[in-house]
Amino acid sequence: MTSAIALTGLTKHYRGVAALTELTLDVPAGSIFGFLGPNGAGKTTALKILAGLTRATSGTASIDGIPVGVEGVHRGRVGYLAQEPRFYGWMTGRETLEYVASFFNKDASASRPAGLLELVGLTEAADRPTKTYSGGMRQRLGIAQALTGDPAVVLLDEPAAALDPLGRHDVLEIMRRLRGDVTIFYSTHILDDVERVSDHVAILDRGRLVVTAPTADLVTSVTNSIRVTVLGATEATAAQLAALSGVAAVSPARRQGDEWSFDLTAHDGRIVEVQGAVMRLAAETGLIVTGNRQETPDLEEVFLRMVDKERAA
């Protein structure tokens, strides 16, 4: 898959502070890529390097195949939204986008702003001064200005962090609409947002990459738990399940009517093997299997496990 962003050994150290260390990462073109980490993890530093707002101490980065360098050639392929966007309060939303468009192409001011205002749901407020905009409206205007130059990659720094639930919903919906048309690389610590819109995720902690994977793969990769529900179980069933190849442990059984539930813990990498063994046991002992599925944690649990594991290493 083509990389819209490629980072190799990207490092940024200030005096006494290792903000970013040896970050190597590929962001697939057209993806919505969640860049996760606790406060101070180095997310904003990485985004600023990609936006050309600060220089890396070492390592390389490219945007849409163009190296990130002091010449700033890559900036023509990037749209950027800072964590707390600021606009000239006396300008209207339309004037703001026309002003931004003037830096890219003098003809862009004729049509591009109107389409972007419609995309972010600000058509009715287009001719109001931005000082009258709510926080959510300013954030949506910020996304519109980031799109003004028709970038290949949009960098969003905590785009929904300071918004109420309605404002967050609006921002996430805009991101969904852009899926496939532009690559969105955004930092956040709101795990629920990542689960809702991101198809890829990377976790950063204390300036170092912990893990990167498709979101669905990451969630399923950290659990070895299987919930098995059956009809026709006996007191011996738990011991029979525990004796299956690949099973590390079986929780005490729970019974509701004729249905019995067991939580099995598989050894690493043996989930499918255990599920198959359960079905064979059922065929041999006359059990009727009504459920045999891997238990999937939410992203918050995955995040905490990954960060705790990294810090314990």
Image: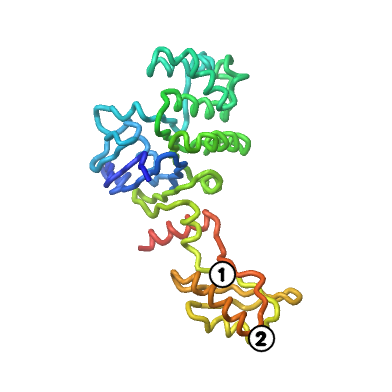
Q: Give the CA distance from mark 1 to mark 2.
A: 19 Å
First reached walking from the N terminus: tag 1 or tag 2: 1
Q: Is residue 204 above or below residue 44?
A: below
Mark sitting on residue 226: 1
Q: Position of residue 3 (x, y in %)?
A: 35, 42
Whether residue 112 is situated above or below residue 239 in the rendered picture: above
Q: Which colour scheme is used?
A: rainbow
Residue situated in front as seen by the camera: 76 or 307: 76
In terms of depth relative to the viewer, which is nearer, 294 or 194? 294
Asked if the residues shown at circle 1 and circle 2 are in contact, with their CB atoms under 8 angstroms apart, the answer is no
Q: Where is residue 267 in the image (x, y as percent from the top left)?
A: 46, 73
Q: What residue type is labelled 1?
A: Ile
Please say if 91 is above or below 133.
above
The part of the image, by quadrant, that contains residue 103 is top left
Neighbours of disc 2 within 10 Å: few (<14), some (14-19), many (20+): few
The amino acid marked with disc number 2 is Glu
Q: Residue furthest right?
A: 257
Which residue is farthest front? Answer: 283
Q: In this view, does 166 lie to the left or right of 115?
A: right
Residue shown at the point (39%, 54%) measured from the top left: 211
Which residue was labeled with disc 2? 235
Across and down, in percent, residue 130 comes to 54, 19
**Quarter of the image where one finds residue 166:** top right
Label 1 sits on a secondary structure element that is strand
Tell me the crowding category of disc 1: few under 14, some 14 to 19, or many 20 or more residues within 10 angstroms, Cα based. Answer: many
